[in-house]
């Protein structure tokens, strides 16, 4: 999946929709370096760049939303964070992390093509982005014009894709990479929350499996948060999500090796990986994950 979806998962943004497994792998040395910050709570430019690599390696919310649609679930706006709630967010932390929340909600709205709700959430996204002084990366007039012309909602969101990427790079350059980090975390939390709600309601095993795969993504999110260990909000968020990790540790993910084979694709011989990943995700554990992520989300949007 291409990086352009990464920050549309968030808007659609947070990375190219949470839960894909095509993310770039980071070495143990990279992770060790990323976890270091100085006594001021700021991170070095080198560490910021590495953190940016981790951000881009964390998968996206559009894949997950597609699975939600495939489950047969109907649109349910009640599970989303109401767009008018944004008025109460007064700190940069709450604005940034809920910008991620609203981005994932917008991705959910998108798959059901609810244009009226999409415009309301886009307005909220613009308001929060302007408060965070990154509004210059949102061409809202163009987005609204496309919507007024009744174009496909995907077109509205695609207009913003490259701007989200520019915004993320800009924040890193301005030593405000914590804003990107909070946006990413918020989007991931919301996508997981919605997936749990829908998965349990529909008793959908494919969604259970995709939720279980977040065990790996959560480790990356925790590593990212550890970059900002001297930031009180990051520490609280890290501790809350570490509680979630204790539940995810009950999930078993095993790889069963099978010898690769050569196959012909488009006239060329390529190596086919025949190994399989087996995920053991009992419903009772998914319920525990749902309860834990719901508690964390309640703190974020409350």
Image (tube, rainbow, N blue to C red):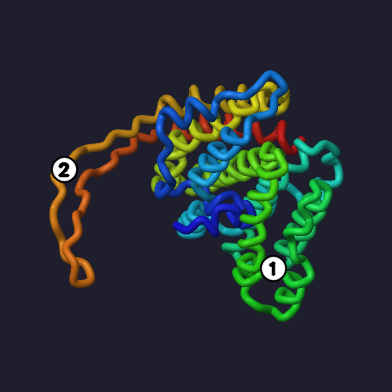
* Whole-percent x, y for residue 283 in the image: 43, 35
Q: Quadrant of residue 127?
A: bottom right
Q: In the rendering, which numbered label is found on residue 9?
A: none
242 left or right, relative to 295: left
Q: Which residue is mark 1?
A: 115
Marks 2/1: CA distance? Answer: 46 Å
Q: Nearer the viewer, residue 244 or 235?
A: 235
* Whole-percent x, y for residue 114 in the image: 66, 66
**Residue at the far bottom in the pictured view:** 149
Q: In the rendering, which numbered label is found on residue 258?
A: 2
Residue shown at the point (18%, 72%) measured from the top left = 267
Residue shown at the point (19%, 59%) measured from the top left = 270
Q: Is residue 124 above or below residue 298?
A: below
Q: Are marks 2 and 1 in contact (CB under 8 Å)?
A: no
Residue shown at the point (66%, 36%) measured from the top left = 297
Of tags 2 and 1, the one toward the viewer is 2
Q: Is residue 195 above or below residue 256?
A: below
Please tell me whether mark 2 sits on a helix, a strand or a loop. Answer: loop
Residue 102 visible at all: yes
């Amino acid at each position: 999946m291409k990086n352009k979806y990464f920050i549309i998962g968030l808007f659609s943004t947070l990375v190219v929709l949470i839960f894909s497994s095509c993310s770039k792998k980071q070495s143990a040395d990279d992770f060790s370096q990323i976890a270091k910050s100085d006594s001021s709570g700021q991170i070095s430019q080198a560490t910021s760049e590495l953190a940016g690599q981790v951000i881009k390696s964390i998968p996206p919310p559009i894949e997950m939303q597609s699975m939600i649609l495939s489950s047969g679930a109907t649109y349910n706006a009640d599970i989303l964070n109401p767009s008018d709630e944004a008025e109460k967010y007064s700190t940069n932390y709450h604005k940034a992390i809920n910008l991620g929340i609203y981005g994932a909600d917008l991705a959910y709205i998108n798959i059901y093509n609810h244009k009226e709700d999409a415009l309301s959430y886009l307005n909220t996204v613009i308001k929060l982005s302007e408060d965070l002084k990154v509004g210059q990366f949102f061409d809202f007039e163009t987005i609204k014009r496309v919507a007024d012309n009744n174009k496909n909602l995907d077109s509205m969101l695609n207009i913003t894709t490259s701007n989200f990427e520019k915004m993320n790079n800009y924040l890193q350059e301005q030593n405000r990479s914590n804003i990107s980090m909070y946006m990413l975390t918020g989007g991931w939390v919301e996508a997981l929350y919605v997936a749990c709600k829908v998965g349990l309601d529909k008793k959908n095993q494919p969604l259970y499996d995709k939720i279980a795969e977040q065990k790996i993504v959560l480790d990356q999110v925790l590593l990212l948060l550890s970059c900002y260990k001297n930031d009180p909000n990051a520490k609280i968020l890290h501790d809350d999500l570490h509680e979630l990790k204790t539940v995810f540790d009950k999930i078993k993910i095993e790889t069963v090796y099978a010898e690769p084979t050569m196959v012909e694709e488009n006239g060329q011989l390529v190596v086919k990986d025949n190994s399989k990943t087996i995920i053991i995700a009992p419903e009772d554990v998914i319920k525990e994950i749902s309860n834990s992520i719901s508690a964390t989300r309640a703190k974020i949007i409350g």
